[in-house]
Image (tube, rainbow, N blue to C red):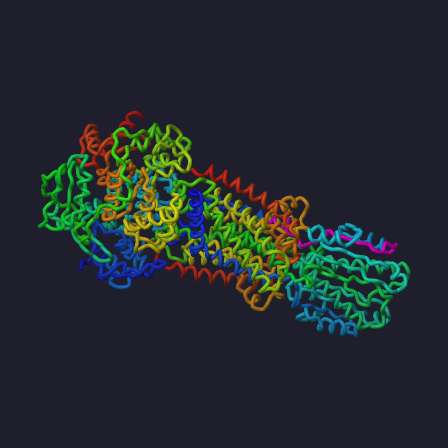
């Protein structure tokens, strides 16, 4: 009874220290809001408003159709004419246009003669992702222009691919980003709170006072879990509400399961944060330690780029990364109504990570508490 | 108006905006003026938050006053040539991770000393400060006394004609304080003026002039003797047997006629409110052979700042259960051959002592001598390399967490949570000591009532004035009525008014049967202890009552009669012995 | 004369502090290596073989041939199943990203000129991958159909065909885009993070009072504090460029003086930004948080290296104009992949130096001459 009340007093103190601190509040309030808006609006995979260059050596009907098709495309912002291939190349180098088309001299004549015409497209490979997408657009535009030039030419009907995107019919990128954001922001917040916890006591000189109180090491550590925990869970709830409301992402699965996952996930992160905090001598080191851990955690989670694309030798690191598992669970619960057994499959590695990191934090804390 | 005055201030005022949640805006200074002539040392004295730091910063051009005229070197402070002042901020402004030499070089060059001059000047400064053997040591790893000397050397690196020192002797032992004073005099040329801000009244006696600040106003400006003169005819003393002294002093301080008091040699010495008052009759066991005494600066200071308040019997102590005196009771604190090494460095070597219930035991010694390490080993904060310590029957390095329940601890540095309110801090500590519900509420209310913290209840601990912070720290240390109390320099940096109140509580708590272990650099506080242990260079070099220490000092050399003289003589004797052994 | 000595003294002090704190060195050496490794090896937008299920309900010669074509294609790692259900479950469990269903009568339909469409089901929860495999499946089917027509002499070449050539990055490797972006992040981090700490630390520890009480003019003080970190930033950039060229075989087609110019311009902007944060907050913890929010995140998201600025909503586009990294990415990508394009370098460098000058002026104002 008395031990429990001590723990409660400790947890309450830790909570107040974090929540009453004007400085911590900037992290806890400002940073999630900025990230929610910034990520929500800035992360887009679409490529719109592109500038295209044109070298027209043909001057015939094919060129007119091509220009008309380019004008008709909603993604093309401006069309610039260049007098030579070299000038176009220079324009690409100076980033005046992202891509340019070179219409060869006999294009219209060849097409009129019933032959196929080939148009050379130069694209700016410095922006690899955008260039690839623009390449796709240009193919479609050429097809449309071709159909105008020779409407009758259609071969025997061919089998087509009917695509259906499950869980996200319009392939809205936000539907992916937002559920993943829960995992990412929780990582950033929980780690910054917990990484500072012990280091802050050391730097502000409250550590000795804490050690002289009749508290056991594991109680002190458990007390430090409280604020990180509250931060993690409260954020999850806010995001779970804000994401469907602001961005229209459906929440198809069980909120309770999501909360459970966040609890386990936060535990694994708190353990990690406390480890950093026990090792750090001052706040600056704790902060840098936190940064050095958070960045790989996020970049190896499947958030920045698909896990499938990572080399095989990095996959074991992904498999032990709690953020990766949390993203899978969050995506699953938001979009896929993920069944409980599959949630469990990703919950267990996070639980294991929590146990390991806590044990290590406890050992470090005892070793460094003198 | 003096033609060549270094400083000439007239009607200076400064107001600061509210420092934080709930705290009011503060009038730091109001209508302050003074003149500093070349070749003089001016003491700037006053309690916490009197405006000393603000006034120094105004003289250094770091704070712009709202009102009044400030002339430095006969010209407006706005056109101040900063290379001609040596300002030592309270923090010392040392770079803790940089070496002694790096710090000195930085400030020498910053103040515009040229290459040819600076080597010579630095060598001279190192020589004067005695820091020459430690040039490569990081400033953060120096002892408190050495750090202050280094900070002063940095401030005066370019031999400026005006030196402004903000509490250079705070937290420093008597020996180092003497050295710091000597250093200041060595550094000052015949034309140099020094402003020395302090809350330690012994410093004031050494100054040519003193300016007493209180709540931002000038209360006195003139020679120290003039300050002492305020208390003429009000100072009395009487011999009292050792076992009664503390109780007698406490009873005297609770009289409405008494402003201040202390133990001086074998006597209780009081400052009375009025020349018409007679020293109180203190009942049996107390002496009644009152003699009038020559007033000191601290007597005059106490009279000048007297707000007509009367110390009440310590309610903090009343909350402790009375532990019956029992001569057979086991020691409450025991150190048996305690030793601590860090690599090759011996921090504490074979220190043994014991403290009985009801005893106030003082640990004295120069900065860095090993007092704090001894303290930390007994509390279980550091693991001894040799010997062991016991507190209330437990070895705290191995005992369970519950054993720490018997212990109250007040660290040297304020160590409560600055962002939490007074209420939240106390609630946390109560909870950590296992007090819950009505018990916790009662204990907190009692602490708040007894230490007059009610007005600060909702304020963040970090924004409190120093004296209130110390009261809060004491409240946190005694809330659970521990049987053993550890106080590590509880009055460091605190003004005389708060120190008096503090010791009033400490001695009363000890009389309830609590064992108190305390470290201090103030010899008037050491006089209040039952027994003292003097630690120097990791060794215990003297042990006994204050009177016994003075006797031991007389045995090694002829010294003055005060405890401070004894302190210095005993350490000097140890140094000579070490030098002789080495030779 | 004395001002120069004082400036040199502050600079020497900064260097001494840097050498004494291992975490600073960590930031300069470890952070570049870590970020280069992550962006060079871990983060990749190049889709490789995607695990895809396939259900052949037809089991005709044509359908078997199509399945074989999928199995041969380098973008697909095929896993065949008798029915959709087990694959649907596998998709839930992230084991496949798409399912191709060849309908019954596919072969017959092709033969009698009434072809039946195949179905591609994707995991929309991974929109990037979903879009890629849907596109690849379309391409594969078109090629396969054309090849079959060709075998029967019925080939119909398209009227207009695009022959795409990717300049500066013929293999269209995402690493070529990501690694220069990572360098920008490293510089932004060193610039804002490190400097965000340095003035705040002086205020927190009370050493600022000592500096302000000395005769050194504030602009010189700021410059002296800045310079060592400028050098560190350049050193970190050098580490990054070395790793990019040696370990990740990025081409370096520009010249080093050009690289130096744009790095110096960017560093002047972010160092100034960090110092301003530091002088404004006077608190290390808040400083680092602001540095993270105003330095790291915008450099990652609003600089145009991951997401196209032109495709962002208009208000966000305006916001990118005050992100210094926006002006760094184009010259940095060019100096690696294209060469010295001074038409890109000069205006961007000028804007970044402009930011630097503005921040420097603001810092000088913020520090002022007084303490309170």
Instruction: Give residue B267's quadrant in the image.
Output: top left
Q: Quadrant of residue B56?
A: bottom left
Q: Position of residue A257 (x, y in %)?
A: 60, 53
A240 horizontally vs B2: left or right: right
Let me know if residue C16 appears in the view. no
Q: Point out residue B254 in the picture as x, y percentages from the top left corner.
A: 18, 46
Q: Nearer the viewer, residue A119 or C155?
A: C155
Magenta residue span:
C36-62
Q: Does residue B333 appear left or right of residue A182 in this picture?
A: left
Q: Residue at x 46, y 38 (%)?
A: A368
Drawn side of residue B578 relative to residue B548, left or right: right
Residue C51 among those drawn in magenta: yes
Looking at the image, residue C88 sits to the left or right of residue B145; the answer is right
Give how far across and how far down residue C146 sits, in percent: 84, 60
At horizontal 61% and vertical 64% (from top left) the residue drawn is A248
Q: Nearer the viewer, residue B339 or B143?
A: B339
Is residue A330 visible in the rendered structure shown here? Answer: yes
Percent x, y of residue A70: 72, 71
A52 to B83, vertically: above or below: below
Residue in the image at 30% along x and 47% along y = B470
Taking the magenta stretch, the answer to whether it contains residue B412 is no
Q: Nearer the viewer, residue C30 or C213?
A: C30
């Amino acid at each position: 009874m008395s031990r429990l009340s001590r723990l409660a007093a400790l947890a309450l103190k830790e909570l107040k220290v974090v929540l009453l601190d004007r400085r911590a509040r900037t992290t806890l309030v400002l940073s999630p809001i900025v990230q929610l808006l910034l990520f929500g609006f800035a992360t887009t995979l679409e490529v719109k408003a592109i500038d295209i260059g044109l070298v027209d050596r043909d001057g015939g009907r094919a060129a007119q159709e091509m220009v008309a098709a380019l004008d008709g495309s909603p993604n093309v912002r401006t069309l610039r004419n260049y007098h030579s291939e070299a000038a176009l190349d220079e324009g690409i180098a100076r980033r005046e246009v992202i891509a340019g088309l070179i219409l060869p001299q006999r294009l219209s004549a060849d097409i009129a003669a019933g032959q196929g015409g080939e148009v050379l497209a130069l694209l700016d490979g410095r922006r690899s992702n955008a260039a690839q997408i623009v390449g796709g657009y240009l193919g479609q535009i050429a097809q449309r222009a071709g159909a105008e030039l020779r409407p009758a030419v259609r071969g025997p009907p061919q089998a087509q691919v009917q695509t259906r995107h499950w869980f996200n019919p319009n392939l809205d990128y936000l539907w992916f980003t937002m559920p993943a954001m829960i995992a990412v922001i929780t990582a950033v917040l929980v780690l910054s709170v917990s990484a500072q916890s012990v280091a802050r006591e050391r730097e502000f000189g409250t550590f000795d006072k804490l050690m002289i109180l009749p508290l056991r090491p594991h109680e002190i550590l458990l007390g430090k879990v409280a604020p990180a925990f509250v931060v993690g869970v409260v954020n999850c709830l806010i995001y779970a509400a804000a994401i469907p409301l602001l961005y229209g992402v459906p929440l198809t699965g069980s909120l309770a399961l999501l909360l459970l996952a966040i609890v386990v996930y936060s535990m694994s992160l708190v353990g990690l944060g406390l480890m950093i905090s026990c090792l750090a001598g001052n706040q600056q080191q704790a902060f840098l330690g936190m940064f050095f851990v958070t960045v790989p955690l996020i970049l190896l989670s499947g958030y920045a780029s698909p896990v499938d694309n990572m080399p095989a030798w990095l996959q074991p690191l992904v498999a032990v990364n709690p953020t990766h598992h949390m993203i899978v669970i969050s995506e699953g619960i938001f979009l896929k109504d993920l069944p409980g057994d599959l949630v469990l499959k990703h919950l267990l590695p996070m639980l294991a990570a929590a146990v390991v990191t806590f044990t290590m934090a406890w050992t470090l804390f005892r070793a460094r508490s003198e | 108006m003096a033609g060549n005055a270094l400083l000439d201030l007239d009607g200076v005022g400064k107001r600061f905006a509210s420092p934080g949640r709930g705290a009011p805006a503060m009038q730091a200074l109001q209508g302050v003026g003074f003149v500093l002539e070349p070749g003089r040392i001016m003491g700037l004295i006053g309690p916490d938050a009197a405006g000393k730091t603000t006034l120094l910063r105004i003289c250094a051009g770091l704070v712009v006053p709202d009102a009044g005229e400030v002339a430095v070197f006969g010209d407006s402070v706005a056109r101040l040539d900063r290379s001609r002042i040596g300002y030592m901020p309270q923090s010392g402004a040392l770079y803790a991770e940089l070496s002694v030499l790096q710090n000195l070089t930085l400030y020498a060059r910053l103040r515009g000393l040229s290459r040819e001059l600076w080597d010579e000047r630095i060598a001279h400064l190192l020589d004067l400060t005695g820091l020459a053997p430690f040039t490569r040591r990081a400033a953060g790893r120096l002892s408190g006394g050495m750090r202050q000397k280094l900070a002063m050397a940095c401030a005066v690196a370019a031999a400026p004609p005006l030196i402004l020192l903000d509490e250079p002797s705070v937290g420093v032992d008597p020996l180092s304080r003497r050295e710091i004073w000597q250093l200041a005099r060595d550094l000052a040329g015949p034309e140099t003026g020094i402003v020395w801000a302090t809350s330690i009244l012994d410093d004031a006696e050494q100054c040519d002039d003193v300016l007493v600040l209180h709540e931002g106003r000038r209360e006195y400006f003139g020679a120290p003797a003039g300050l002492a003169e305020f208390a003429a005819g009000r100072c009395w003393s009487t011999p009292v047997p050792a076992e009664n002294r503390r109780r007698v002093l406490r009873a005297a301080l609770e009289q409405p006629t008494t402003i201040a008091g202390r133990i001086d040699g074998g006597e209780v010495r009081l400052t009375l409110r009025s020349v018409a008052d007679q020293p109180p009759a203190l009942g049996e066991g107390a002496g009644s052979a009152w003699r009038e005494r020559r007033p000191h600066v601290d007597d005059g200071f106490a009279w000048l700042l007297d707000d007509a308040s009367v110390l009440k019997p310590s309610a903090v102590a009343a909350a402790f259960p009375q532990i019956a005196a029992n001569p057979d009771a086991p020691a409450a604190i025991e150190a048996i051959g305690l030793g601590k090494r860090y690599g090759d460095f011996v921090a504490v070597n074979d220190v043994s002592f014991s403290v009985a219930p009801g005893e106030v035991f003082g640990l004295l010694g120069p900065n860095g001598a090993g007092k704090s390490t001894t303290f930390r080993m007994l509390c279980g904060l550091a693991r001894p390399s040799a010997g062991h310590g016991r507190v209330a029957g437990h070895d705290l390095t191995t005992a369970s967490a519950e054993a720490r329940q018997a212990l109250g601890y007040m660290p040297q540095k304020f160590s409560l949570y600055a962002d939490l309110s007074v209420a939240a801090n106390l609630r946390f500590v109560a909870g950590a000591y296992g007090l819950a519900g009505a018990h916790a509420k009662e204990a907190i209310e009692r602490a708040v009532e007894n230490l007059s913290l009610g007005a600060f209840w909702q304020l963040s601990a970090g924004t409190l004035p120093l004296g209130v912070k110390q009261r809060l720290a004491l409240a946190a240390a005694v809330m659970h009525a521990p049987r053993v109390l550890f106080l590590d320099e509880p009055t460091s940096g605190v003004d005389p008014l708060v120190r008096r109140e503090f010791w009033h509580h400490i001695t009363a708590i000890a009389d309830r049967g609590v064992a108190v272990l305390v470290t201090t650099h103030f010899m008037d506080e050491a006089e209040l202890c039952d027994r003292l242990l003097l630690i120097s260079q990791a060794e215990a070099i003297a042990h006994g009552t204050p009177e016994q220490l003075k006797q031991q000092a007389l045995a090694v050399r002829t010294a003055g009669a005060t405890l401070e003289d004894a302190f210095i003589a005993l350490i000097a004797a140890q140094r000579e012995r070490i030098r002789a052994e080495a030779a | 004369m004395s001002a120069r000595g004082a400036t040199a003294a502050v600079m020497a002090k900064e260097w001494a502090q840097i050498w004494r704190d291992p975490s600073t060195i960590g930031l300069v050496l470890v952070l570049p290596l870590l970020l280069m490794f992550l962006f060079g090896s871990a983060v990749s937008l190049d889709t490789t073989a995607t695990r895809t299920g396939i259900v052949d309900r037809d089991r005709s010669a044509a359908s078997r041939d199509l399945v074989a074509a999928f199995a041969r294609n380098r973008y697909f790692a095929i896993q065949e199943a008798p029915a959709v259900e087990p694959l649907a479950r596998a998709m839930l469990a992230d084991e496949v990203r798409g399912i191709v269903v060849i309908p019954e009568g596919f072969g017959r339909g092709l033969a009698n000129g009434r072809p039946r469409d195949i179905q591609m089901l994707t995991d929309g929860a991974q929109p990037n991958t979903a879009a890629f495999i849907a596109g690849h499946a379309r391409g594969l089917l078109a090629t396969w159909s054309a090849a079959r027509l060709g075998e029967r002499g019925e080939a119909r070449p398209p009227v207009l065909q695009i022959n795409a050539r990717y300049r500066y990055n013929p293999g269209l490797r995402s690493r070529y885009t990501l690694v220069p972006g990572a360098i920008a992040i490293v510089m932004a981090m060193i610039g804002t993070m490190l400097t965000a700490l340095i003035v705040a630390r002086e205020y927190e520890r009370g050493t600022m009072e000592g500096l302000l009480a000395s005769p050194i003019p504030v602009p010189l003080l700021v410059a002296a504090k800045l310079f060592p970190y400028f050098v560190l930033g350049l050193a970190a950039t050098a580490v990054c460029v070395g790793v990019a060229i040696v370990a990740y075989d990025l081409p370096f087609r520009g010249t080093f003086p050009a690289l130096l110019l744009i790095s110096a311009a960017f560093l002047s902007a972010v160092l100034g930004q960090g110092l301003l944060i530091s002088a404004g907050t006077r608190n290390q913890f808040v400083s680092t948080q602001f540095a993270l929010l105003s330095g790291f995140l915008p450099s990652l998201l609003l600089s145009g290296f991951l997401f196209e600025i032109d495709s962002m909503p208009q208000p966000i586009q305006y916001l990118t104009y005050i992100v210094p990294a926006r002006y760094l990415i184009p010259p940095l990508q060019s100096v690696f992949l294209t060469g010295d394009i001074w038409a890109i370098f000069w205006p961007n460098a000028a804007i970044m130096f402009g930011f630097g000058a503005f921040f420097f002026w603001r810092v000088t104002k913020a520090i002022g001459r007084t303490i309170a």
